[in-house]
Image (cartoon, helix red, strand yellow):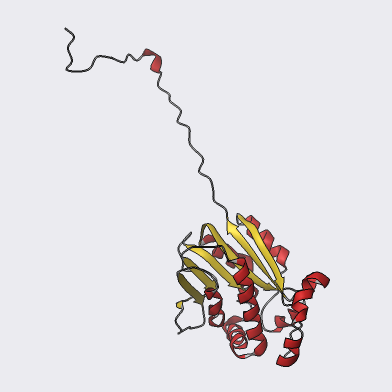
């Protein structure tokens, strides 16, 4: 991981105890509601920290699971593991969420490859990231390297996923004052029109392709021209 276990703990504390952390989670929950309104399945998996577990509630899946190196004792099913090798069977998950998780690892493409490996054909992956050119880029002090959206999209295409949806959000600057931040809510409505490239964060949704089965043509080597087929039915003697 980019800065280790301690950085993940700080990130988790910021999400759960700081106003802006809660604002980020609330915005991502709203985005997920719109992105996953028509997706169904059974298994949903979040690869991140316990403070993000509530993001699993914004889908219709029956089973919700969190994978994290940070211990989690709440109701959500929890698997304690690092982000290098996911202890999940290949092709077993309907939905995988990666909320800023790629920003914490030394090799984000490897983690993305692991996440894609465990997704069923026609399953979805949702990735959240901070925009390196947006006002929220200062969060780089807390997380690792920020990743541009087009890199994520290219990696998904190489992993045989096709892009379904994408979204930009967080047009308000990350102001610590609750009152000022709330007064600037109108920027979320006009930001996408006036300055779309300066959004604080983005979301990318991609679906796993179904590999078609290629029928194998059997090549008969036996010459059938010299084979005689009897039309007499055994036991039926002509009279």
Residue 63, picture quadrant: bottom left
The quarter of the rendered structure image containing the N terminus is bottom right
Task: In the rendered view, tell whether residue 20 sits above or below residue 190.
Answer: below
Q: Relative to residue 89, is residue 182 drawn left or right?
A: right
Q: Position of residue 155 (x, y in %)?
A: 65, 60
Q: Would you place residue 20 above or below residue 197 in this image? A: below
Q: Residue furthest top?
A: 239
Residue 142 picture location, percent across and down? 67, 84
Could you tell me if residue 192 is visible in this image? Answer: yes
The answer to whether 232 appears left or right of 171 in the picture is left
Residue 147 lies in what quarter of the image?
A: bottom right
Q: Nearer the viewer, residue 27 or 214?
A: 27
Q: Give whichever of 26, 45 is nearer the camera.
A: 26
Q: Disc count in the image?
A: 0
State the residue at coordinates (78%, 79%).
Answer: 187
Q: Report x, y in % for residue 82.
A: 52, 75
User: For the point 50% across and 75% down, which residue is it?
Assistant: 66
Does residue 107 appear in this view? no
Residue beneath the point at 53% across and 45% down: 212
**Image-based side of 105 in relation to 62, left or right:** right
Q: Where 36 falls versus 141 (above or below)?
A: above
Q: Position of residue 225 (x, y in %)?
A: 40, 14
């Amino acid at each position: 991981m980019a800065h280790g276990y301690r950085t993940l703990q700080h990130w988790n504390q910021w999400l759960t105890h700081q106003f802006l952390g809660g604002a980020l989670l609330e915005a991502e929950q709203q985005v997920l509601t719109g992105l996953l309104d028509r997706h169904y399945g059974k298994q949903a998996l979040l690869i991140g920290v316990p403070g993000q577990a509530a993001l699993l509630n914004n889908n219709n899946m029956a089973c919700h699971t969190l994978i994290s190196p940070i211990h989690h004792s709440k109701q959500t099913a929890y698997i304690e593991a690092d982000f290098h090798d996911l202890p999940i069977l290949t092709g077993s998950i309907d939905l995988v969420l990666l909320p800023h998780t790629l920003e914490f690892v030394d090799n984000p493409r490897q983690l993305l490859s692991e996440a894609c490996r465990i997704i069923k054909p026609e399953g979805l992956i949702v990735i959240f990231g901070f925009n390196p050119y947006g006002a929220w880029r200062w969060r780089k002090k807390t997380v690792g390297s920020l990743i541009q959206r087009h890199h994520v999209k290219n990696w998904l295409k190489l992993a045989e996923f096709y892009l379904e949806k994408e979204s930009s959000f967080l047009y308000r600057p990350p102001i610590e004052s609750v009152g000022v931040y709330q007064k600037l809510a109108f920027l979320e409505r006009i930001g996408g029109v006036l300055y779309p490239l300066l959004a604080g964060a983005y979301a990318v949704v991609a679906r796993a392709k179904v590999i078609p089965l290629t029928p194998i043509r059997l090549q008969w080597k036996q010459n059938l021209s010299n084979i005689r087929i009897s039309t007499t039915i055994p036991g039926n003697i002509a009279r």
